Structure formats: C-alpha cells, structure tokens
Image: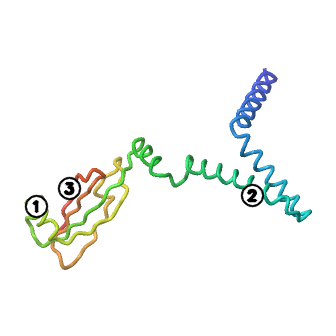
Amino acid sequence: MEKEQIEEIKETAVRNIKGLLEEHWLPIVAFVVLIVSCQLFNWTHSGFFYPIMFISGWIVVMFALKYKSENSIFPSKKSTKNMQQDSSYEMYTVLRVYTNDPNFQEYMQNQEYFHSQHVQMENRVIDHSQDIESQIMFIRKSEFAFCYHLLMDRKNEMYFIGEYV
C-alpha cells in the first residue's frame, strides 16, 4: 500500500515537472543561459558574451513582467475589477460636507447649493460585509455645526451615510 502511494506521488511529481517544463521552457532556458554567460564573462572578460547576456536577460525580464502583471500583489486595473466582483470590497469617493445649515438634506440635490458648502473628498475602499458608517472617520471642524457623509461610486451615484452634529 505504501509503495503504491509513493509511486503515485512520484508519478504526480514527474507529471507536474513535465507540465512546468513544457509551459515555461523558454524562461527557464533563458535564465540558465544568462547565468552561464555571466559566469563565462566573469572568467574570460570576452565581449562575445554581451549579446548573449542581453538577449537572455531581456527574455527573463519580459517573462518576469508578464507573470508579475498576472499574479501581482498590487493588481492592475483589469485584475482589480475581477477582484471587486468576487469580494465585498469596492472603491468609493467619500464626501464630507461641512455646513451650518440644518436643512442641508432638503436642498442637497441642488447642485449650486451643494457646491456652495465646504466639501472634502477622499477615495476609500469600503468593505460591504462591515458597517459602512464605522469605516468612515468623522473629522470635526469647529467652525461648522453639521457634517454629512456621502459616498459616490464609480457610476457617480451618491449615497447618504450619516449626519453628525
């Protein structure tokens, strides 16, 4: 029984290695050629190795950039869109509207009135699985009596979050 499991693990490992080599043979060969040509250049200081080092280095860098963009820690915009569809996180613009007018909510649809108020904007990632109000920090400004928090999404739709006195 143990021999069968060991043989099965060996076969799986060999299959995985063959698949890796078939899929990534060019960057592997380029990396090996780069290392060997750099070492030979160090021994001989021959200019013959310059083009070999340049071409193999270029191939290694291009593959590294390709795989970095596909499996990035800081994903590109395309990957970010996919990540946002799969998760509860979404990017919003947080609007902090400071005013002394207690009737702000009634008139905030009026664009001229809205822009006459003191507005601070910041981009923030909001987690929908948690309370949205608690994710937006209230910053008090003593010269204003009221602070309203609004969220604006990518479609420029606004959502009222809270009122602070």
Which residue is rendered at x = 12% and y = 66% of the image?
112
Closest to the camera, between mark 2 and mark 3, is 2
Q: Which quadrant of the structure image shows residue 146?
A: bottom left
Closest to the camera, between mark 1 and mark 2, is 2
Which residue is rendered at x = 8% and y = 61% of the image?
107
Q: In the image, which disc is placed on residue 96?
A: none
Regarding mark 1 in the picture, which secondary structure is present there? Answer: loop
Q: Position of residue 101 (x, y in %)?
A: 10, 70
Which residue is rendered at x = 61% and y = 52% of the image?
65
The residue at which mark 3 appears reads as 160
Which residue is rendered at x = 39% and y = 42% of the image?
85
Q: Position of residue 49 (x, y in %)?
A: 83, 58
Q: Quadrant location of the C terminus?
A: bottom left
Q: Position of residue 64 (x, y in %)?
A: 65, 51
Give the alpha-carbon distance from disc 1 to disc 2, as whole Å. Answer: 62 Å
Q: Amino acid at mark 2?
A: Phe
**Looking at the image, is 116 positioned above or below residue 27?**
below
The residue at which mark 2 appears reads as 54
Q: Quadrant location of the N terminus?
A: top right
Circle 3 Cα neighbour tier, 10 Å, few/some/many (<14 / 14–19 / ≥20) = few
Regarding mark 2 in the picture, which secondary structure is present there? Answer: helix
Image label count: 3
Q: In the image, which disc is placed on residue 110?
A: 1
Q: Which quadrant of the structure image shows residue 34?
A: bottom right
**Tags 2 and 3 touching, CB below 8 Å:** no
Q: Position of residue 73 (x, y in %)?
A: 54, 53
The earlier-in-sequence mark between 1 and 3 is 1
Q: Amino acid at mark 1?
A: Asn
Give the alpha-carbon distance from disc 1 to disc 3, as whole Å. Answer: 15 Å
Circle 2 Cα neighbour tier, 10 Å, few/some/many (<14 / 14–19 / ≥20) = few
Which sits in the foreground, 165 or 15? 15
